[in-house]
Image (cartoon, rainbow, N blue to C red):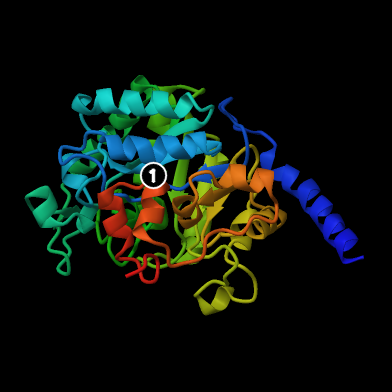
Amino acid sequence: DSGLIRYGALLSAFKQMKNLFQPLSFNCGAVMKNLFMLAPLTNLQSHDDGCLSDDEYRWLTMRARGGFGLVMTCASHMQAIGKGFSGQLACYSDDHLEGLGRLAAGIRAASSLAVVQLHHAGMRSPEDVIGGQPVCPSDNDETGARALKHEEVEQLKEDFVAAAERVRRAGFDGVEIHGAHGYILGQFLSAAINRRSDEYGGSLENRSRIIFDIVKSIRKRCGPDFLLGIRLSPERFDVKLAEIIEVAQRLISTGDIDFLDMSLWDVFKEPEEEAFKGRTLMSYFTELDRGHVRLGVAGKIRTPVDTLKTLEQGADFIILGRAAILHHDYPVQVHDNPLFKPATLPVTREYLRKQGLGESFVKYMSGWAGFVEN
């Protein structure tokens, strides 16, 4: 009897898991072969000049071959002064085109969509990494960052768009704009950090203006068939949940983006702000009037059951970070065994090497509490 019960549970799980392997189309015409997207993960593996390394190529193409429907690069800085960490992949110069082209080809060869995340760290750019003073929407005493001049804001917008055009030339299917985690676009969104008095500061409409300008220009200059998404985070880093909800809905309503990537830290958690408690943080975004825009969510999605719960609660696709570090072939594992149990932490350094992490990435992960065995 117990064998029959287990067989019945397995059959039911297989039927449910089929939903994860249905293709997902985007408004631009791109199609993701399943609902698994690789999160943009810091990995410290590229060369000092921002050019692609063999280690980063291996790490990302292994995920493509491992079945991810979309593989996204780490945050890739689109201005030299926007570099956020050593070993960061760059896209601000044509010098980066050769490596970017190689990477795009390697990802697409495995029938995965290839996407670059466009990033600028702003006041979070370390002086010793960029060799000078970081920039911010306003002067920032805590980080020592200086305020961007008006013409520098205009140049920042142009460089985001130029990077998207460069990435398209390199053969990528699209880009994601990094508006999350307190980096420069998130700094513009924050009323606490952004104290500008021009059209880029003050009201939420003004503080979000740079994002809408960048989105509109990328869509115009890269065309209707270019995959365009944006990542937002609704908490921490001096942003307000109500404002991020409003910005998200407005971005969807423009019709210019194909997907919204919400970084939630934990997809099943309640909001931090008292007025919004009593339901999940994710629910505030699944209830948006999404039209043709697809919603992906990230945050502690670990097991196959977690992925199904996330879909059942209204997300269109799954964005995996830690789970993808631990299993380069996570989608294949789930496809072949719905009862698949991911590796438990901590893991050995050798285990991570076998999953395609180079030494710089392994060292970086060893700094995450409880992730790597001492």
Residue 294 x, y percent position in the rendering: 60, 42
Q: Nearer the viewer, residue 23 or 188?
A: 23
Q: Nearer the viewer, residue 173 or 367?
A: 367
Q: Nearer the viewer, residue 188 or 40?
A: 40
Task: Identify the residue at image location x=26%, y=45%.
Answer: 45
Task: Identify the residue at image location x=83%, y=53%.
Answer: 12
Residue 242 x, y percent position in the rendering: 51, 64
Q: Relative to residue 108, is residue 278 drawn left or right?
A: right
Which of the 4 image quarters holds residue 104? top left
The amino acid at mark 1 is Gly
Confirm whether residue 165 shows in the render. Answer: no
Which residue in the protein does label 1 denote?
356
Residue 1 x, y percent position in the rendering: 92, 65
Confirm whether residue 342 shows in the render. Answer: yes
**Outermost residue toward the right?**
1
**Relative height, residue 6 to residue 165 (above, below):** below
Which of the 4 image quarters holds residue 133? bottom left
